[in-house]
Image (cartoon, grey):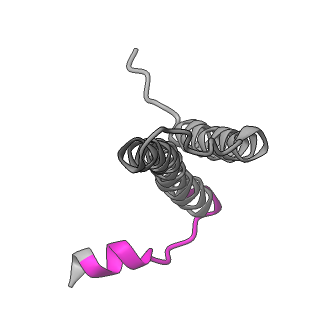
């Protein structure tokens, strides 16, 4: 007996996975905002102060970049999961309307 996969379930799983990733990214960003305490550069010379400040800025940019990529990836999953759920719903309802992507493919 051949078992097919349930595309609606896969769409919901991708949708929930994207939502979880976006929520985790938002939580981590909020947590980083709440706990961030800038370190004022203490150094005996101007070179050390600039180096410490540059280190803090690079560290902050890396954290924000990671969170941005995480939320971006989660939003892609959200979009694709939502599209899959909508397409399965249209097919289940018997709608014969083509999606915009199907219209482009047929032209």
Magenta stretch encompasses residue 103: yes
Tally of numbered tags: 0
On screen, 16 above or below 65?
above
In this rendering, would 41 be left or right of 19?
left
The location of residue 62, given as percent across then percent down, is 44, 44
Residue that lies at the very extreme toward the bottom in this rendered image: 107
The residue closer to the viewer here, 17 or 60, is 60
- What residue is rendered at 52% in x and 50% in y? 64
Residue that lies at the very extreme toward the left in this rendered image: 107
- What residue is rendered at 43% in x and 22% in y? 3
On screen, 4 above or below 27?
above
The residue closer to the viewer here, 85 or 43, is 43
Residue that lies at the very extreme toward the front in this rendered image: 44
The location of residue 73, given as percent across then percent down, is 46, 48
Q: Quadrant of the N terminus?
A: top left
Q: Quadrant of the C terminus?
A: bottom left
The location of residue 106, given as percent across then percent down, is 23, 78
> Magenta span covers which residues?
91-104
The location of residue 5, given as percent across then percent down, is 46, 30
On screen, 4 above or below 87?
above
The residue closer to the viewer here, 24 or 8, is 24
- What residue is rendered at 55% in x and 54% in y? 88
The residue closer to the viewer here, 5 or 1, is 5
In this rendering, would 3 be left or right of 37?
left
Question: Which quadrant would residue 55 be assigned to in this image?
Answer: top left
Magenta stretch encompasses residue 50: no
- What residue is rendered at 34% in x and 73% in y? 102
């Amino acid at each position: 007996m051949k078992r097919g996969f349930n595309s609606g379930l896969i769409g919901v799983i991708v949708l929930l996975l994207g939502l979880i990733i976006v929520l985790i990214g938002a939580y981590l960003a909020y947590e980083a905002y709440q706990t961030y305490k800038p370190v004022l550069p203490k150094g005996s010379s101007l070179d050390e102060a600039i180096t410490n400040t540059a280190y803090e800025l690079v560290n902050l940019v890396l954290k924000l970049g990671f969170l941005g990529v995480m939320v971006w990836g989660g939003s892609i999953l959200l979009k694709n999961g939502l599209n899959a759920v909508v397409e399965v719903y249209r097919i289940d309802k018997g709608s014969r309307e083509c999606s915009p992507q199907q219209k482009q493919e047929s032209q």
